[in-house]
Amino acid sequence: MLIRTMVRTSSVPWAAGPLFLLVWYMSDDLGRRVVPAYWESASSIPAYCLFAIAPVCAACAAWEAGRLKRGGVAQLGAARAQVMVVAQALAPVALLGLAAVTGSFLTVRVSMGSALDWPSVSVIGMITVVLAAHMLLGFVVGYALPRLLAPALILVLDYLWMTLPPTFDTMWVRHLTGHLETGLPVTDRINPDSVIAPAVVAAGIAAAGLLVALTSGRRRMAAALAGVLGIGLGGLAGQHLVADWGPSAPALARTDQPACAGKKPEICVPRELASVLPELEGASAAVLPRLADAGIPAPQRLSTASTATRVGPETWRVYASPYLTEDDARAEIAEAALPDLPDCLAHTDAYVGDPLPLRVWLLLAGGVPDDVVTEHYGPDALPAMAGVRAQSEEKQLDWFRRNLNLLKQCEPSPETQAIVR
């Protein structure tokens, strides 16, 4: 009965419908794009939805604060009574945030199909801390500003904080909001600092909000100053963790055992992609002998490995997806012969060539059908390589090796400046 009364008298019922609808739509859409069964990537989707959940919870908390201020709760005699009234007012708001996050996780689970693990505990903890911080900040703003102004103001400002940082040139700011980006590769795991940094910042905000909310009279100014200090310390600690980051968190390779098949070569993929091993085995049996005839020795191992993992010359990095077809598998095996190339643009602004012609040559040398090559690289791919393919096998191999060495050294290569699309 108490919970029903608390919800009925709060602003939560008015906000719940639109919020749940938006969270469901975003979670369902993003959940269909993740690798099925890979919860590490899927767990970032509810955190992504914080851009909507956090501002709504902050605005509802601000409305509740205004209602309590009008009722004169600050004039209650016992501090314990004030705390209980505030807690009862914010309980429906906390329930709203919890229900939205839970709904997001459930929607993602249904959208992505099977799951081999459970959602990331660290992401759940970060979401909880961030929501609590936004809720307490909204409550403080609601107590400080007029009742009709505070909810609208905190809703807009909170939304801008969650969505604008990705547009800033100062890229580390985006990593402090808790609004995680989605699309984590199946070869990677969530960088712990991308979860710790927003949690630390949110903890500073939450501590400041609690301090101000539970202090009255002359001590409120001192509490506000202490709160600003707490927010500053939390911000500095979070910034220290992500200060050197670019638009995305640095990749971290998974440490669990992959699923493997075959012997020469051994083919290994993350266990969520184990179903595509037969396609990769068949493709390697068809493509590798053709590449060997063209002068490209077969590897000892084909691995779907993280970009954070360095692979030796005997290992080819093959990219796999759960929807790999036979033709796609052949193309991926052929392109895997191209080793990792340096990011030349990170060191120079000069144009240094493009590896796409080399990729096209590998596909053709590996016996990939012409229509698959055209599908991957456009109608100009085959005509652009006609001159190279007309040469002898020895000259073609010399062309490949020469241009590969130039690309490895970030030197201009006229033969690879004509980008094949």
Image: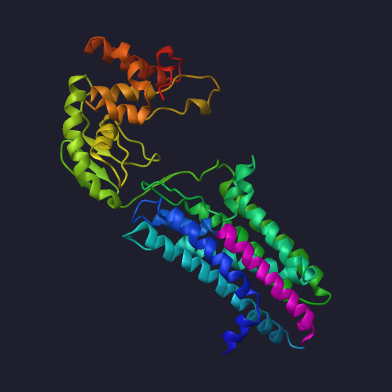
Left or right position of 225 against 31: right
Question: In the figure, residue 60 lies in which quadrant?
Answer: bottom right
User: Does the stretch in magenta take in 60?
Assistant: yes
Is 211 or 97 nearer to us in this picture? 97
Q: Indicate left or right for 353 with 212 as reference.
A: left
Q: Nearer the viewer, residue 225 or 198?
A: 198
In the depicted structure, whether residue 43 falls above or below residue 64:
above
Magenta span: predominant SS is helix
Res 96 → quadrant: bottom right
Say which quadrant the N terminus sits in. Answer: bottom right
In the rendered view, tell whether residue 298 sits above or below residue 326: above
Whole-percent x and y of residue 344?
Answer: 48, 25
Question: As drawn, is 87 to the left or to the right of 286?
Answer: right
- The picture places residue 339, in percent across and down from the top left corner, at 34, 28
Q: Which residues are magenta?
A: 50-76
Q: Is residue 337 visible?
A: no
413 to 53, vertically: above or below: above
The residue positioned 44% from the left and 44% from the top of the image is 251
Q: Is residue 358 magenta?
A: no
Q: Is residue 360 left or right of residue 229?
A: left
Going 20% across and 29% down the picture, which residue do you hit?
Answer: 287
- The picture quadrant where one finds residue 38 is bottom left
**Where residue 188 sits: x, y (%)?**
39, 47
Relative depth, front residue between 320 and 132: 320
Is residue 360 in view?
A: yes
- Residue 212: image x %, image y %? 73, 71
Residue in the foreground of this view, choosing between 204 and 289: 289
Above or below, 90 relative to 318: below
